[in-house]
Amino acid sequence: TWDQGFFMIRFETPVGSSIDRTDEVMKKLESIVERHPGIQGKLAIAGTQDLNVGFMFVTLKEHEERRRLAEANREKDKAAARERLAQLPPSAPPQARQALEKQMREGRDMTQQGIIAELRPQLFTVPGVR
C-alpha cells in the first residue's frame, strides 16, 4: 500500500449525542493521535454530518524522519510494547494484542499502515466511539 503521508479518521458517537459530547470524545481521540511520534499534525472537526459524527485529518512526518525515529527508538519501543501488553485489559480487541506482540518482536512500524494499525485499537478504547 502506498504511504501517502496522511490519513483520515471518521468517528461516531451514539445517535442522539450532543455536539458537546461529540466534541469531548474528539478531544480524547486527538490526545491519542498527537502522542504518536510519527504524527506531524491533525485537524479534527466534530458535528460534520450529524451532531454525533466527526472527522480527523492526520498528517505524518516525512518518510525519512519516521524511519530515523523508528531506528533510534527500536529497543525503547519494544520495551514499551511489553509494558502496554501487560496492562492490556482482557476486554481489549484481539487486534490490540496482536499489534503489541508484533511491536515487541520488531519495534514500531512507522509506515502509514503501521501507524494506523497501532492507533486503531487505542482509538476504540475511548468510551462512546463506534
Image (cartoon, rainbow, N blue to C red):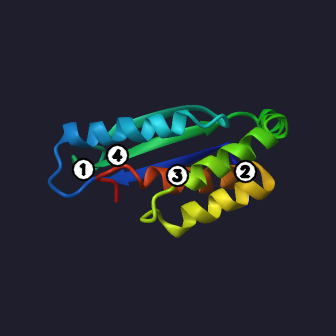
Q: In which quarter of the image is residue 24?
A: top left
What residue sits right under mark 1 in the picture? 52
Crowd tier of the residue under label 4, counting other residues whose Cα lies within 10 Å: few below 14, some 14–19, many 20 or above:
many
Identify the residue at image location x=22%, y=41%.
21
Query: From the viewer's perspective, is residue 41 above or below residue 2?
Result: above
Locate residue 43 relative to residue 81 in the image: left or right: left
Q: How much space separates mark 2 and mark 3, taking CA atoms?
A: 31 Å
Crowd tier of the residue under label 3, counting other residues whose Cα lies within 10 Å: few below 14, some 14–19, many 20 or above:
few
Crowd tier of the residue under label 1, counting other residues whose Cα lies within 10 Å: few below 14, some 14–19, many 20 or above:
many
Could you say where residue 34 lies in the image, as x and y percent from the top left? 53, 33
Residue situated in front as seen by the camera: 46 or 21: 21
Identify the residue at image location x=19%, y=58%.
15
Q: How much space separates mark 4 and mark 1, taking CA atoms?
A: 7 Å
Q: How much space separates mark 2 and mark 1, taking CA atoms?
A: 30 Å
Secondary structure at badge 4 equals strand
Look at the image and tell me in which quarter the N terminus lies. Answer: bottom right
Of callouts 2 and 3, which one flags the residue occurring earlier in the amino acid sequence?
2
Closest to the camera, between mark 4 and mark 3, is 3
Q: How much space separates mark 4 and mark 2, taking CA atoms?
A: 24 Å
Residue situated in front as seen by the camera: 48 or 22: 22
